[in-house]
Amino acid sequence: MPLVTVVITLGVIGLLLWLVNRFIPMQSQIKSILNGVVVIAVVLWLMQLFGLFEYLSQFRIGH
């Protein structure tokens, strides 16, 4: 995926999250949970996109 597409996608996600936070009334706890879920999803998507999951799967914990 080209870097321009990644940057545009991140911009659109950020804009949508800002619009939801700004114009949809909801409790602050729900807003915090929504923001956390979106941030975690975006980080996981970026890790998968740049191939960090394959790198992390090489590490073993325990025996």
Image: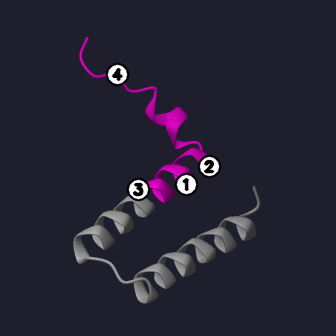
Mark 3–mark 2 Cα distance, whole angstroms, equals 14 Å
Q: Is residue 50 in the magenta section?
A: yes
Instruction: Give the residue pinned by disc 1.
Output: 46
Q: Residue furthest right?
A: 2
Instruction: Check disc 1 and give the amino acid type.
Output: Leu
Q: Secondary structure at mark 2?
A: helix
Specify how the rendered protein is coloured: one colour
Instruction: Give the residue pinned by disc 3.
Output: 40
* Mark with earlier residue (3, 4): 3
Residue at the image position 32 percent from the left and 72 percent from the top: 31
Q: Secondary structure at mark 3?
A: helix
Q: How many numbered marks appear?
A: 4
Quarter in which the N terminus is drawn: bottom right
Q: Are marks 2 and 1 in contact (CB under 8 Å)?
A: yes
Residue at the image position 36 percent from the left and 83 percent from the top: 25
Q: Are marks 1 and 4 in contact (CB under 8 Å)?
A: no
* Mark with earlier residue (4, 2): 2
Q: Is residue 45 in the magenta section?
A: yes
Mark 3–mark 1 Cα distance, whole angstroms, equals 10 Å
The answer to which quarter of the image holds residue 22 is bottom left
Instruction: Check disc 2 and give the amino acid type.
Output: Leu
Q: Nearer the viewer, mark 3 or mark 1?
A: 3
Residue 16: x %, y % from top left? 55, 77
The span shown in magenta is 40-63
